[in-house]
Image (spheres, rainbow, N blue to C red):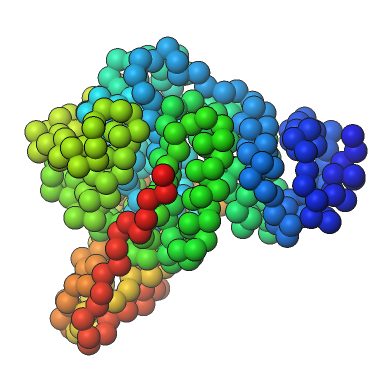
Amino acid sequence: MRMTDILEKKKKGDVLSRDEIAFFVEGYTKGTIPDYQASAFTMAVLFQGLNKEETAALTDCMMHSGEVIDLSAIEGVKVDKHSTGGVGDKTSLVLGPLVASCGAKVAKMSGRGLGHTGGTLDKLESIRGMSVSLSKEAFREQVRQIGISIIGQTGDLVPADKKLYALRDVTATVDSIPLIASSIMSKKLASGSDTILLDVKFGSGAFMKTLEDAKTLARAMVEIGRSLGRDTRAVITDMDQPLGYAVGNSLEVMEAVNTLRGKGPKDLEELCVSLGAIMLDQAGIVKDTETAKSLLRQKIASGEAYAKLKEMVRAQGGDVSQLDDPSRFCDVAASVTVYADREGYVHAIEALTVGEVAMHLGAGRATKEDTIDMAAGIVLRKKIGDYVKCKEPLAVIYTNKEAYQPMAEALSGAFVILPEQAKENPLIYTVIA
Ligand code: URA
């Protein structure tokens, strides 16, 4: 088999066989196929697409390019959830302990933040002492004992995606639905859970900017999961404004703690209860999603969901006293309030701008090598639909950087305030099951 023949076929829009796709994935992972041929391949796929069978074959080959985690020694249904990323998205910090407190097994491998989106691992590391790099044995043992562990991906999981994603990033070939779907799903499938729930976000702060694109991506991922024998479902959710009020690592952990204690923002709690109900249904723990929702709310009210978070943090070496007393999270040099310059209703809070401002304040990474300031970030005081008076606070910035004034101005510009009442977006648009 020759790579040039495969490229010729895809260039013309022909369908590739499983063997041809396997030849490409193996060769590129081992280094026998060079970057220039792999970039021609990704560009041909970007223009010609892949059909369902080709996308499933690409995912399967990528998934088996490295280690596949075996969680079969853990009793019960292992549930997983993945978000395509957003601003202020601390869902995993709430949802993981919440569903684990209902008896589901959460063996979760998460990622780090890049650009305007945050990552669960960075947020967890804002808790003093918390380790997110456990050995596979320790990870499995913790899930067996307490029902939950959240760690970073092990080194040899899906090496094909590691190489291919980095290449796509520099060859303008990230935005291809079959390539995104196979990239995300190969990692989810390799991390070994029995069920997968995908939270596909769309809007200004998300990877997918339109509802149609979000649905197409969600359907592609659900089809891949199903064709490879996993119960996979997807939920399309709003990212036209940040989720909750807090954006930034330790600020988001504090908001997650408040939510697990029943004192969190309405949108975050509603999203976690809705996603949690689907995960419990996937795990076969409840007879229907309405029963699941009341069980989840009961676990918040009783304190069991919060106790589960503390159990996980303690097991991974984190300082749980910090969770009980948020003032023990590290301090910042300045907190600056951003005020409204007119009165009216908040119609939009450009999530991309909020994410970028948070990143420039130190809460995120512009490049993979940047270090994060765990205490930096933003707390919104108003959300879409709220009425605001002139000179009332819109948000507070927390930073250790001195030159914060341009960031305060950019944040103020993210708010669209108009005289007429604003319509709130639905939080969940549709469920693809
Ligand atoms: N996230 C991934 O893991 N892969 C993509 O291709 C895009 C987003």
Task: Give residue 352's quadrant in the image.
Answer: bottom left
> Is any atom of residue 226 visible in this view?
yes
Instruction: Give the residue displayed 25% in from the left and 74% down from the top.
Output: 423
Query: Which one is in front, 339 or 275?
Result: 275
Residue 46 placed where, x, y %?
A: 70, 56
Residue 173 lies, with reference to residue 19, above or below; the image says: below
Instruction: Give the residue displayed 78% in from the left and 38% down from the top.
Output: 17
Residue 205 placed where, x, y %?
A: 43, 62
Residue 144 lies, with reference to residue 224, above or below; the image says: above
Residue 133 placed where, x, y %?
A: 45, 26
Which quarter of the rendered picture does the C terminus lie within? Answer: top left
Task: Give residue 409's quadrant in the image.
Answer: bottom left
Residue 120 lies, with reference to residue 8, above or below; the image says: above
Q: Is 236 on the left or on the right of 207, as rendered?
A: left
Query: Which one is in front, 91 or 224?
Result: 224
> Is any atom of residue 400 visible in this view?
no
